[in-house]
Amino acid sequence: ETMDIDDTQVAGEGKTLDQFDCELRERVSPYFMDGDKKLKGTGQAYVVFKYQTDKDIIEDVYGRGKRLKHPDGGEELSFSISPVEPPNVQWWYFGLSEPDRRKRMFKFAGKLALLVLFIQGCVTMPYNYFVVWPYSSTGTVASGVKVTIAGIILGNTNWICFLSNYLTAEQIGYRTKDWLYIFVLISNTVVVYVLTGCNTILTSAHFVRHSHRSYIGPKEYFEM
């Protein structure tokens, strides 16, 4: 006897199938009753069959001219084969529970933070300390081959970080790509601030040092 995803989840939570079904019904019932949570649709829906033979039977019946009707309604239902799956849905993560998804998010976010710290410590900070800061101390700006090479290295490390963000988001287990893209947007924004933070701090320190000021206001910040 085989076990599907629902059986595995029920066994893991120590519930009977009846209890599991009752919880699911209570959770989705407001979606079909009058109220704020009632679902609003376009009149179209995707049907995912468990077996190929079930789809073939429906297609054969509809192809012979017989019309399909919903058990709770009298209107006829049209039927057509979809050439593609909904682009926003990731079916393979539907069996992943919410606690497991949170664990994955914290795990992969931690790995991403370690990658950013590694890049900061091994690439960004050495470049600023050994190249940018000596020039800034003399009142000049770094230029030439060393800056070009550093720009290539920093550009590639940034690209690696952004690519890691996307690959990380894909492994977290979001059921729809909306949340995947939200994670990518937030993580990329944080990474940009972290990666540019070192440059901003050094530039601010240089400005304060040469202007003999103890602070930087909004006006000075945007003038840098």
Image (cartoon, rainbow, N blue to C red):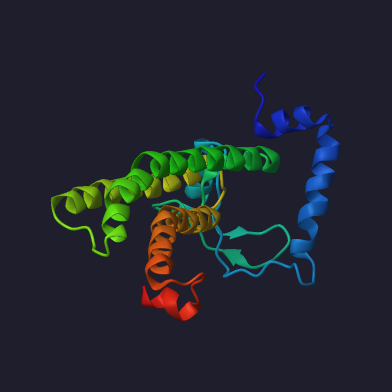
Q: Position of residue 109 (x, y in %)?
A: 54, 43
Which quarter of the image is occupied by the C terminus?
bottom left
Q: Position of residue 19 (x, y in %)?
A: 86, 38
Is 96 left, or right, of 38 in this rendering? left
| Side of 85 relative to 98 (left or right) | left
Q: Quadrant of residue 204?
A: bottom left
Image height check: is 140 above or below 161? below
The answer to whether one can see residue 217 in this image is: yes
Residue in the foreground of this view, choosing between 114 and 22: 114
- From the viewer's side, name the closer residue of 168 and 161: 161
Q: Is residue 75 above or below residue 135?
A: below
The extreme front residue here reads: 212
Residue at x 81% of width, y 39% of height:
20
Quadrant in the picture for residue 203: bottom left
x and y, in percent, of residue 57 in the image: 52, 43
Q: How many numbered dots are placed on residues in this image?
A: 0
Residue placed most toward the observer, 195 or 12: 195
- Above or below residue 17? Residue 173 is below
Residue 151 placed where, x, y %?
24, 52
Query: At 38% from the left edge and 46% from the top edge, which residue is drawn?
Result: 125
Quarter of the picture containing the N terminus is: top right
Image height of 218 relative to 162, above or below = below
Q: Which residue is outermost to the top?
A: 1
Q: In the image, what residue occupies the spot 31% across and 47% down?
A: 127
Residue with the most extreme left position = 145
Please indicate, yes or no, whether residue 92 appears anywhere in the rendered image: no
Report the residue at 79% width, 53% height from top.
Answer: 27
